Image: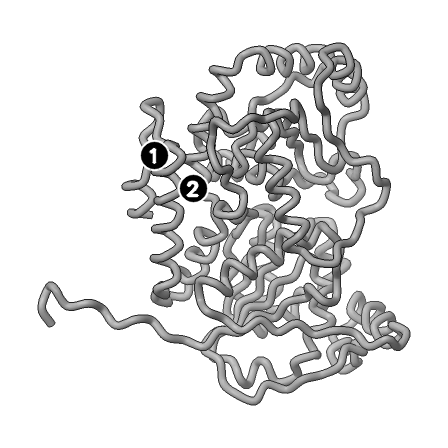
Amino acid sequence: MTSSAVSAPVRREVLIFSQRKLNANISRCSGYEFEDVVAEIEDAQVLTPTRTRQPRIPLNPKRWLSKRTDLFQHWPSGVPQSRLTKDYDLFLCNVQRPDELLVLDAVPNWRDQCDTAVCVLEEVWSGDIDLYTPLIKSLSQFDLIACAFAETCGMIQDLTDTPVIQMPAAADMVRFAPDSLNVDRPVDMYSMGRRRAELHQNLLAAIKQRRGFYIYDSATKPPITGDHTVHRDLLANLIQHSKLFMVDIAKLGHADQKAGNIAWGPRHIEGFAGGAIQVGYAPDMEDYHRFFDWPDSVIRLPEDPDEALERIVALWDDPAEQDRIRRINFAHGLQKHDWMHRWAQVLDHLNLPEPDGMLKRRQHLSDIAGKLGATQQEQTLGPNALAAT
């Protein structure tokens, strides 16, 4: 083969098992976005089982059994089954919590028909390991497990005797990228989901005094969406027009759920993916610093709510500093926090070649960097660096 020869394109059959028609909670939309990016890169088939209109009686006993014995695998979930009729090179099962594995029986012959199988597990706290032990052990059917939380990767690997890698959250940087980093941002602060009550009250008072624009959630229960792409487009558009975006450590106000674990989620990327300045609170731990290895990924606020407000006001009043941080953060996001980069981790661990779709997406991210000028002298990232990752 001559040096000028073009390598043959990578062709493989990839199947993604998605729960997008089983769970419409907006907390799942980020995971479905990940599936969409992988489907685009791999030209994959997305399998979307649905429930019948019958009561969910079968699933309840199965959930009860799954917390006590591996016999749960012999109890039907009630989701209609559909057997695979062809072979696949790669199977991706993406779940948020272990109990979503209960409906995997919708594809009863998935293991027989798929050469390599990967399970992406978004959220499992160390305190829940005992609760989900039979379910987690069932992950031994997979060749690779990717877990978002560093603290539980080792525990899952011990239970399954299966390789586990950390694969944290990301964002569709193509979707979230603004038309321009200089676009008008009329929203002074966007605070999504849980928040700190005293700081929130301070922000309300400050925004009223400044005649500004503060967006926050008023719902007390997680809403559902009819289409995850509509929700992600709305979220991206709101962030693209926000100056500041509030972030915090996962499960704020729910210490009983996280059981001492400290973690971060998609919010810590979505803000700068849309060009907003992230302010708030982030873990001070190796796991966080490994993925956010530059100082301005989040402007850390003091714990005191009055001092925190002073820091926020100072940023509001300094457009030049906002612009500097925005460009640095956005460039880092393009280089390392697109969903493509997470899928590359999986392929690398499995020693699988990257498909042509991966090269195309890298080029797309590089084009965005060039178009938006996300290559400030303060930092060394740019289109060339993107093409090399």
Dot 2 amino acid type:
Leu
Q: Position of residue 205 (x, y in %)?
A: 79, 14
Dot 1 amino acid type:
Leu
Does residue 372 sit above or below 134 in this rendering? above
Cβ atoms at labels 1 and 2 below 8 Å apart: yes
Number of other residues with Cα within 10 Å of mark 1, as a class: few under 14, some 14 to 19, many 20 or more? some
- Residue matched to label 2: 334
Q: Position of residue 88 (x, y in %)?
A: 49, 80
Considering only order in the chain, which callout, 2 or 1, is on the residue closer to the N terminus? 2
Query: What number is the disc on residue 215?
Result: none
In the shown orientation, is residue 158 left or right of residue 20?
A: left
Question: Marks 1 and 2, Cα distance to the nearest angstrom?
Answer: 9 Å
Question: What residue do we see at 71% from left, 18% from top?
Answer: 212
Closest to the observer: 192 or 256? 192
Closest to the observer: 162 or 189? 189
Question: What residue do we see at 79% from left, 65% from top?
Answer: 67
Does residue 270 sit above or below 98 in this rendering? above
Number of other residues with Cα within 10 Å of mark 2, as a class: few under 14, some 14 to 19, many 20 or more? many
Quarter of the image with the N terminus is bottom left
Closest to the observer: 314 or 100? 314
Q: Residue farthest to the left?
A: 2
Callout 2 secondary element: helix
Question: What residue do we see at 69% from left, 54% from top?
Answer: 28
Q: Position of residue 349 (x, y in %)?
A: 41, 61
Q: Residue farthest to the bottom?
A: 85
In the shown orientation, is residue 68 left or right of residue 123?
A: right
Question: What residue do we see at 79% from left, 80% from top?
Answer: 76
- Residue matched to label 1: 381
Does residue 34 sit above or below 82 in this rendering? above
Callout 1 secondary element: loop
